[in-house]
Image: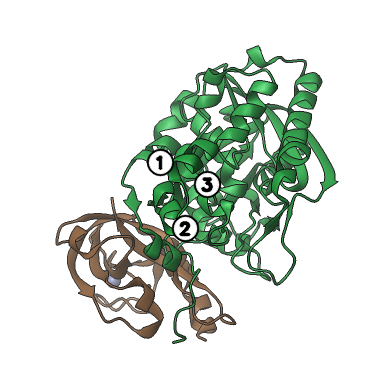
Chain colours: A brown, B green
């Protein structure tokens, strides 16, 4: 049960909200308190584009137990249209459908079911366009 | 003028064919296809549910409406498969689409009619002037017991409607509802699969309410079947809506565009709203559309809709329903299908 953390991360996980440094314009995803480039502490919220390309990917054949029903699946690092990179699962795709350069869109999916008494967790995944 | 300012359907990519279900049970696939007028149905992915389907449909509706989601005053989701027993699906959906926190949220239930209920109430809010935009969604990931006739039809998908009073693409001209206590289909708390009363589901339930609502709607609005380009009736299978449409006086050509059931199955709360979306996707200014839903228990909501000039401007701003039905289908065999639908007990982790 990681409900407090899940709740805190809703803006980034649900709506792709990133932080844009007020001084140098660097975009951080997830948002950071201090800019990793210039050290500034002020930032504004920007929403990331939901299209991008796979930078690299890997097939997960032996996943953690709770994702066992979805194996084999692909995890990918995706570079979005504005250059921001993030890591996520690729929904729906058989492993041979995803490769470096594959165009993807980010979609909203259920990430974790957990056990019957736990909160369902949602967030972004990629899918081949 | 008040009505639809944006709509969006979401169709999952997974499918199972009638042959694959029939083959599993030693049933006659050809007879089922003939009887149900259905060739395949949608199946939700392992990471899809009524919430994710609602989010995808709502995002398409927002794209068509071209509005700031923060101006949406309410989010009502009609479904028979809300993921939580206690915690509204809408709480997750408004945060995912950026409509919160100033938003009135409720989940609706009324078997397959819950989607048009959500639309009905959303429309009433904008018509009364209480809010600028209102979101009503019908979505489901329905289940039929293994081997039951419902297993051939129960499917997944949904459609979202944003109602408003500015930039209306399809005016809601009039509404009508028709409801009675009819025990055709039910599920008591704690039961996993619903029960249906066999033949009782046809005449006294579906046809009585669908035709009652449709005839009432025509009489109230002073219109005749010939005044409409399209008509959509709830699609529990392929046969019922065509039979109801013809009995109400509509011709086959008026029924075809919204008849998505042969490729989609019965998406319960998403059924007639998705049929309407398929019509809006191709409608011309001035076209009238009649929609009548049906929910067991039982009741029907009927709408008279008239498209405006605006409709041509927004049709292409999001994926069309029939394109999603045709594109990128991923077929599952029966073994994969039961695993996807959680119908078999796996070892506990
Ligand atoms: Zn900086």
Which numbered disc, 2 or 3, marks the residue closer to the eye? Answer: 2
Is residue B167 in sight in this rendering?
A: yes
Quarter of the figure with residue B303 = top right
The quarter of the image that holds ligand 1 is bottom left
Q: Secondary structure at mark 2?
A: helix
Disc 3 sits on a residue from what chain? B
Expressed as whole percent of the image width and height from the top left, the position of residue B97 reads 51, 56
Rounded to the nearest whole Å, what is the CA distance between mark 3 and mark 1?
A: 28 Å
The answer to which of marks 1 and 2 sits earlier in the sequence is 2
Which numbered disc, 1 or 2, marks the residue closer to the eye? Answer: 2
Expressed as whole percent of the image width and height from the top left, the position of residue B267 reads 55, 48
Is residue A81 in sight in this rendering?
A: no
Q: Is mark 2 within 8 Å of ligand 1?
A: no
Expressed as whole percent of the image width and height from the top left, the position of residue B118 reads 68, 47
Res B25 label: 2
Relative to B120, say whether A37 is above or below.
Answer: below
Q: Residue at x 73, y 34 (%)?
A: B207
Expressed as whole percent of the image width and height from the top left, the position of residue B331 reads 34, 52
Relative to B280, say whether B12 is above or below.
Answer: below
Relative to B283, say whether B43 is above or below.
Answer: below
Residues B187 and B55: in front is B187
Residue labelled with disc 3: B68
Q: Secondary structure at mark 1?
A: helix
Residue labelled with disc 1: B325
Q: Which residue of the protein is positioned furthest toward the left in this rendering?
A: A100
Asked if the residue at tag 1 contacts the one at tag 3, i.e. Cβ–Cβ closer than 8 Å, the answer is no
Q: Which residue of the protein is positioned furthest toward the right in this rendering?
A: B181
In the rendered image, which quarter contains the N terminus of chain B?
top right
């Amino acid at each position: 049960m990681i409900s407090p953390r899940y709740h805190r991360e809703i803006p980034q996980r649900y709506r792709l909200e990133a932080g844009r440094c007020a001084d140098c314009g660097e975009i951080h995803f997830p948002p950071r308190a201090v800019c990793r480039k210039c050290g500034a502490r002020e930032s504004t919220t920007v929403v990331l584009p939901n299209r991008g390309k796979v930078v690299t990917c890997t097939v997960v054949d032996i996943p953690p137990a709770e994702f066992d029903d979805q194996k084999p699946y692909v995890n990918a690092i995706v570079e979005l249209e504005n250059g921001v990179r993030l890591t996520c699962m690729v929904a729906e795709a058989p492993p041979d459908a995803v490769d470096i350069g594959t165009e993807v869109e980010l979609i909203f999916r259920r990430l974790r079911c957990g056990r019957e008494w736990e909160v369902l967790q949602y967030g972004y995944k990629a899918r081949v366009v | 003028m008040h009505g639809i300012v944006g709509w969006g359907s979401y169709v999952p990519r997974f499918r199972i064919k009638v042959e694959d279900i029939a083959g599993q049970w030693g049933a006659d696939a050809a007879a089922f296809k003939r009887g149900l007028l259905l060739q395949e149905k949608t199946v939700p992915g392992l990471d899809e549910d009524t919430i994710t389907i609602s989010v995808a449909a709502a995002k398409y509706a927002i794209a068509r409406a071209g509005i700031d989601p923060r101006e949406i005053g309410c989010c009502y989701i009609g479904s028979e498969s809300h993921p939580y027993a206690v915690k509204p699906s809408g709480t997750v959906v408004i945060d995912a689409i950026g409509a919160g926190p100033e938003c009135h949220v409720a989940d609706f239930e009324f078997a397959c009619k819950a989607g048009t209920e959500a639309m009905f109430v959303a429309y009433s809010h904008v018509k009364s002037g209480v809010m600028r935009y209102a979101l009503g969604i019908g979505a489901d990931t329905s289940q039929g017991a293994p081997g039951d006739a419902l297993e051939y039809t129960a499917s997944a998908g949904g459609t979202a409607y944003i109602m408003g009073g500015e930039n209306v693409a399809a005016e809601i001209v009039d509404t009508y509802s028709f409801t009675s206590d009819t025990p055709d289909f039910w599920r008591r708390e704690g039961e996993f699969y619903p029960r249906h009363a066999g033949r009782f589901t046809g005449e006294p339930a579906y046809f009585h309410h669908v035709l009652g609502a449709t005839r009432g709607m025509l009489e109230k609005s002073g219109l005749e079947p010939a005044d409409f380009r399209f008509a959509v009736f709830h699609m529990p299978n392929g046969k019922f809506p065509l039979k109801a449409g013809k009995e109400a006086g509509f011709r086959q050509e008026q029924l075809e565009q919204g008849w998505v059931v042969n490729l989609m199955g019965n998406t319960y709360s998403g059924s007639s709203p998705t049929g309407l979306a398929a019509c809006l996707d191709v409608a011309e200014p001035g076209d009238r559309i009649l929609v009548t839903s049906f929910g067991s228990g039982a009741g029907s909501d009927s709408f008279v809709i008239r498209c405006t000039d605006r409709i041509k401007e927004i049709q292409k701003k999001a994926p069309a329903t029939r394109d999603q039905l045709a594109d990128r289908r991923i077929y599952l065999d029966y073994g994969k299908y039961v695993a996807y639908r959680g119908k078999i007990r796996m070892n506990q982790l």
